[in-house]
Image (tube, rainbow, N blue to C red):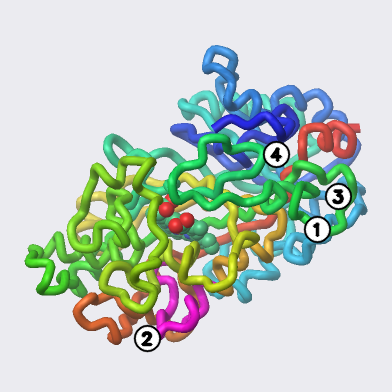
Amino acid sequence: TNGTFLPLQNIQGDILVGMKKQTERLVFFQINSASGFRSALKTYLPQITSTATLISPAANQPLAFVNIGFSQTGLTALGITDDLNDAEFASGMWADAANLGDDPSKWVSPFKGTAIHGVFVLGSDQASYLDQYQSAISSTFGSSISVLTTISGAARPGDQAGHEHFGFLDGISQPAIGGWTTNTLPGQAIVPNGVILARRLGDTATRPSWALDGTFMAFRWFQQLVPEFNKWTLDNAVQPPPLAGVTLNAQDAADFLGARMFGRWKSGAPLDLAPTVDDPALGADPQRNNLFDYGDALLDETKCPFSAHIRKTNPRLDLPLLSINNHAIRSSIAYGPEVSASESASNTTSQDRGLIFVEYQSVIANGFRFQQIAWANTANFPPAKLETPGLDAVIGQGTPRTSGGLDPNNQTKMFTVPQFVVPKGGEYFFVPSIPALTSEFAT
Ligand code: HEM
């Protein structure tokens, strides 16, 4: 992918391509002095990584990439009163937690409330460079900011790189962006660039001119209960239909249930194309691993359950009306250690691990929030099915927490799935263009 139409030197790098580094750190800060912050940012601006820099030859790249975003209270602290015209951004994610289905008592400080003014997103192939860049931020910004907390993530080791903690390959399906993506992959949705970037084609909200090429970042801190997930899938394991002629052993049957919860095998192979046996070559092949649309099984869950995570969050042909505005770009990374032997033996999480979830869109209510509330948390979505789909088996939130279709041999059975993904915090940020940082934030 490399497009020429969008001004890549203006757009912060994590948005369209993702930093895709071994390690990442989110540094959440509060602004103590608007004037101090503005003059420090003026000095610091050359460190903010554009898309152009991020895709330049490795020899021209810095040791770490840096992006920056601001919450509504951050804009206010800087005296920026222009209305970005996004209701959820204006109120902040803490105010939205219950609407998203979160248990607010599981949220931790400083995310409870509106104290976070901004975030630096750092990415590098070495954690030591993140430390170095974070010290440089501390010395440049001095007492104009206080760091409230940081969260560090890292690719999982060895052959699990690119897989989230339950073991599934992530980051396969992303929308292609008009004016940017040139080599669209088979099966990839193509969206107007205004679905992601403010004031671009298809973004109809009224916003200040400096919002051009900015975007809203939905950050979610998700803890994942991996040993508990492993135990539950073993205890509730399912078999392929007899016609498939395969009987799975206990572990493979557990993996099959896990695959049905996601809609893909751990390898990334989609169930719509590989319904009974994993096909790692298919999972690893970008020309084939997204080329499916559920079109020949719109009323049947033998291949892929309606409640599968990827079917819920991108329903493809399940949705009679086009859902072009409901796409967003994901740029998440795992955090926390591998499951220890004692956690495995006790089927109980004792060390925190999960996903630093980041999604970019021009309208929060259409992107992340729509996928979570209107789709994942809505039991009768996708519509017009003979059996109730139930909640997204991975991220759905609500009571009862039931998901259908997980057993191909008993598709009417509703499974009560414990919540293995626990939101612990989050915030909505605006990630301005680099010219906007220069003209509105750094003077
Ligand atoms: C796809 C994991 C949270 C939206 C996927 C995939 C995995 C995954 C393994 C398949 C890879 C791919 O198709 O690219 C997780 C985990 C989560 C999580 C472990 C939480 C800990 C979320 C949330 C949302 C979301 C909160 C939005 C509300 C999506 C979307 C796709 C996806 C849109 C692509 C679907 C497609 O285009 O077919 N996720 N996810 N995910 N996820 Fe998640």
Q: In the rendered view, does 251 fall on the left or right side of 442?
A: left
Majority SS type along the magenta span: loop
Q: Are the residues tagged 2 and 4 within 8 Å (C-beta)?
A: no
Question: Which segment did they paint magenta?
Answer: 375-394
Which is in the foreground here, disc 4 or disc 3?
4
Q: Tell me the element at label 4.
A: strand
Mark 2 vs mark 3: which is more N-terminal?
A: 3
> Mark number for residue 387?
2
Quarter of the view holding residue 119: top right
Provide the residue designation for mark 1: 204
Q: Amino acid at mark 3?
A: Ala
Q: Position of residue 11 (x, y in %)?
A: 71, 35
Is the CB–ligand 1 distance for label 3 below 8 Å? no
Which amino acid, by three-letter code, is at mark 2?
Answer: Glu
Q: Earlier in the sequence, mark 1 or mark 4?
A: 4
Residue name at image x 76 percent, y 31 percent: 141
Task: Using the numbered discs, state the Cα–Cα distance from disc 4 to disc 3 in whole angstroms.
Answer: 16 Å
Q: Judge left or right: residue 19 versus residue 116.
A: left
